[in-house]
Amino acid sequence: MENLNLLREAILKGNLAAAVEATNKAVAEGHDPQVMINDYMSKAMEEIGQRFEEGKAFVPELLISARAMKGALEVIKPLLKGEKSKRLSTVVIGTVKGDLHDIGKNLVASMLEGCGFEVINLGVDVSSEKFIEAVREHNANIVCLSALLTTTMTYMKEIIEALDKAGLRNEVKVMVGGAPINETYARGIGADGYGNNANAAVNLAKRLIAG
């Protein structure tokens, strides 16, 4: 139990080395990997996200916590093979075609993964075809579109229309985000929701899959 609490604290503090060490020790002690993820690692990410919402933590803290979480997950992932991981849902995320910004998108991806989602990160400059291919391949429930430029944000609408033409729009929820995006724009292009930061995106994703 001590190492599980150390794991939670290491993620909260963003200490990658300590998180990996505590994870290895907890695994060696025979702790259930899924319990480690759901009751300690994800809880830590939820807490740092809440601190961010309250102005008690900032983007650097989110980034290092997400890095520590990812390091701990890398230790655990091989142990989950062959068993059904209790993921909330599958999210395909990417920065839209023509846009090469990825810091915010990667933070959202890390937060989503840390809070229990299976995340397929397509990177930057992603076309509608690639989004559609990924949704089909991974049987995704959510598509998360990111853009940081006013010149590329318009492509979000094209992706939503492409999902519709491909017969996938009713199968997935579409989330959008990025500096030039707001709730009004999101609704105007037919998205299901908008998140103005990583924690808001996680909360939105949870609401969308809850119906």
Image: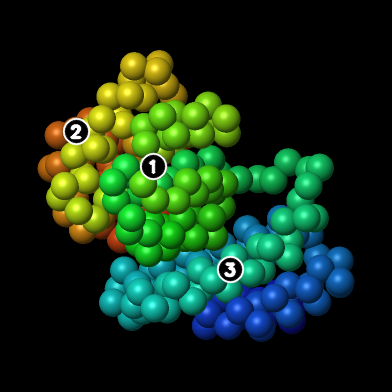
Under tag 1, what secondary structure? loop
Under tag 3, what secondary structure? helix
Q: For the residue carrying disc 3, how many other residues have a C-alpha within 10 Å: few (<14), some (14-19), or many (20+)?
A: many
Q: CA distance from mark 1 to mark 2?
A: 18 Å
Residue 114 left/right relative to 2: left
Image x and y of residue 90, in percent? 53, 40
Q: Which numbered circle lies on residue 126?
A: 1
Pointer 3: what residue? 69
Q: Quadrant of residue 197?
A: bottom left
**Sequence-wise first label, 3 or 2:** 3
Q: Residue at x 64, y 69 (%)?
A: 71
Image position of 15 with respect to 32: above or below: below
Q: Kindly report which numbered mark, 3 or 1, lies closer to the viewer in this rendering.
A: 1
**Sequence-wise first label, 1 or 2:** 1
The reply to whether the C-beta atoms of the residues labelled 3 and 1 are less than 8 Å apart is no
Image position of 97 with respect to 138: above or below: below
Amino acid on which the number 3 mark rests in the picture: Met
